[in-house]
Every structure is written in C-alpha cells, then in structure tokens.
C-alpha cells in the first residue's frame, strides 16, 4: 500500500470502503497454516528408507497456536483443497484487517491534527 501520509482524505475513505468490502466477502476461513509433508515410516525394508525416495504421503495438516500451544490437526486428502482455501481466506482476512487498521490510524492521526490546529486558534 502507498505511504498513507501521502494519500488524500478521499483516497483513504475509498481504501476503507474497499477493505471493508474484502472483509465482508471473507466467509469461511480456518485460522492457521496449511502444511503438506511426506513422511518416513522408519521400517528398514520399506521403500521410503531408500535414498531419493520421497516417502509416504503427502500428509496434510492445519497448524495453529491455541492458548500458547502449537496444535496440529490432520486433514484427510479428500479435504485438502477445501482446507487450503479456508487457510488462504484466513490469510486474506488478516491482511485486510492489518491494512484497515493502518487506514484508520492515519485517519485518526489527521483528525487529531485538525482538532489540535483548531484548538490553538481559539
């Protein structure tokens, strides 16, 4: 995003409307990160023990922090695409919230400056 101090008041208002639209469009999301890994079972006779073998999988999971602890939830392969999309929606939601907070902070800064300037004139 552009440096907000160099944006007009009107452009800030437009940015806020666009961001609130993005937030209203984000529906189902899952907080966390989506992981896709391959694993080795540890059996010496298994194909995954061979050098260059990619291992078993892929294995899918959603990982997030809950109450200060890392929680990993396995995702069935049939749900991998859906969960990948839900986690992407979470990221989009977080980004839009952060940008909206920046826009609102700049608007507040300008409001306070205008108020301070008017109070000095009296």
Image (tube, rainbow, N blue to C red):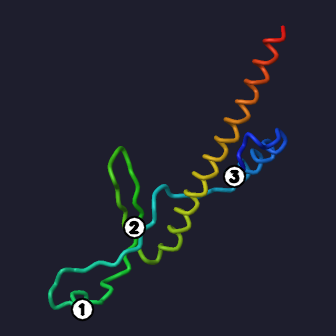
- Dividing the picture into quadrants, the one containing residue 45 is bottom left
In the picture shown, does residue 20 fall above or below 38? above
Q: Which residue does the numbered mark 3 point to in the structure image? A: 1
Which secondary structure lies at badge 1? helix
- Residue farthest along the top direction in this orientation: 122
Label 1 sits on residue: 47
Secondary element type, mark 2: strand
Place residue 107 in its image quadrant.
Answer: top right
- First of labels 3, 1 by sequence position: 3
Q: Quadrant of the C terminus?
A: top right
Image height check: is 65 above or below 83? above
| Residue contact between numbered discs 2 and 3, judged by CB atoms under 8 Å | no
The image shows residue 30 at horizontal and vertical percentages of: 50, 58
Residue 34 is left or right of residue 55, and the answer is: right
Q: Could you say where residue 91 lies in the image, as x and y percent from the top left?
A: 56, 57
Task: Return the residue at label 2.
Answer: 61
Q: Which mark is residue 104?
A: none
């Amino acid at each position: 995003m552009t440096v907000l101090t160099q944006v007009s008041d009107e452009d800030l208002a437009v940015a806020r409307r666009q961001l609130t639209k993005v937030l209203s469009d984000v529906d189902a999301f899952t907080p966390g990160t989506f992981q896709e890994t391959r694993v080795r079972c540890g059996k010496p006779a298994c194909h995954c023990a061979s050098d260059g073998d990619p291992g078993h999988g892929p294995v899918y999971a959603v990982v997030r922090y809950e109450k200060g602890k890392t929680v990993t939830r396995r995702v069935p392969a049939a749900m991998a695409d859906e969960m990948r999309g839900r986690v992407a929606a979470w990221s989009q939601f977080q980004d839009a919230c952060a940008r909206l907070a920046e826009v609102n902070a700049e608007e507040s800064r300008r409001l306070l400056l205008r108020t301070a300037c008017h109070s000095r004139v009296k």
